[in-house]
Image: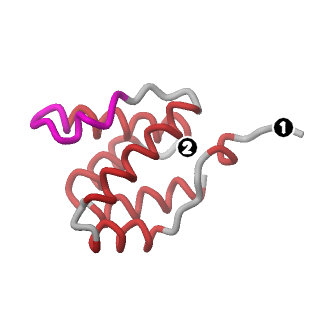
Amino acid sequence: MSTTTRASLTQRSPSSVFLLSLVTLGIYSIVWYAKTRGELNSNGAAVPTTWLIIVPIANFYYLWTLAAGIEKVTRSSAMENFILMLLLGGIGQAIVQSRMNKS
């Protein structure tokens, strides 16, 4: 039996990702970043600490490395994922989660 990359990524409901981010006033967004980072790193990506998300300017670097890690593991476009998370926040996270679920 062969192991696939998908098996080690948690399947989350995109609507739950968005709604939890909304209800918790963004706190779940940080939790989602941290959990996703851990899963990506366990699959060979090199995403730095999630603490960078709260540091001005460094948060752009963090989002870019997260998007690049998602691309490495799921083969979806890093630039598209970066723009979605940067400009759309919780909605972008939900779209990215949907893409991760499909890979």
Q: Is residue 3 left or right of residue 8?
A: right
Helix, strand or loop status at disc 1: loop
In the rendered structure, does residue 54 fall within the stretch colored magenta? Answer: yes
Q: Disc 2 marks which residue? A: 74
Q: Is residue 17 left or right of residue 7?
A: left
Q: What residue is drawn where x is 37% and y is 51%?
A: 31
**Residue sitting nearer the eye, 70 or 42:** 42
Q: How far is mark 1 from mark 2, CA to CA? A: 17 Å
Position of 94 relative to 83 (above/below): below
Image mark for residue 2: 1
Position of 97 relative to 55 (above/below): below
Q: Position of residue 40 (x, y in %)?
A: 51, 37
* Residue type for callout 2: Thr
**Residue sitting nearer the eye, 102 or 19:** 19
Q: What residue is drawn where x is 49% and y is 62%?
A: 98
Number of disc labels: 2
For the N terminus, the quadrant is top right
Residue at the far left: name it. 56
Can you tell which of label 1 and label 2 is closer to the viewer?
Answer: 1
**Mark 2: few/some/many CA within 10 Å (<14, 14-19, 20+):** some
Q: Position of residue 33 (x, y in %)?
A: 37, 47
Helix, strand or loop status at disc 2: helix
Quarter occupied by residue 37: top left
Q: Earlier in the sequence, mark 1 or mark 2?
A: 1
Q: How is the image coloured?
A: secondary structure
**Mark 1: few/some/many CA within 10 Å (<14, 14-19, 20+):** few
Residue range (magenta): 48-59
**Residue sitting nearer the eye, 92 or 34:** 34
Q: Is residue 39 left or right of residue 94?
A: right
* Residue type for callout 1: Ser
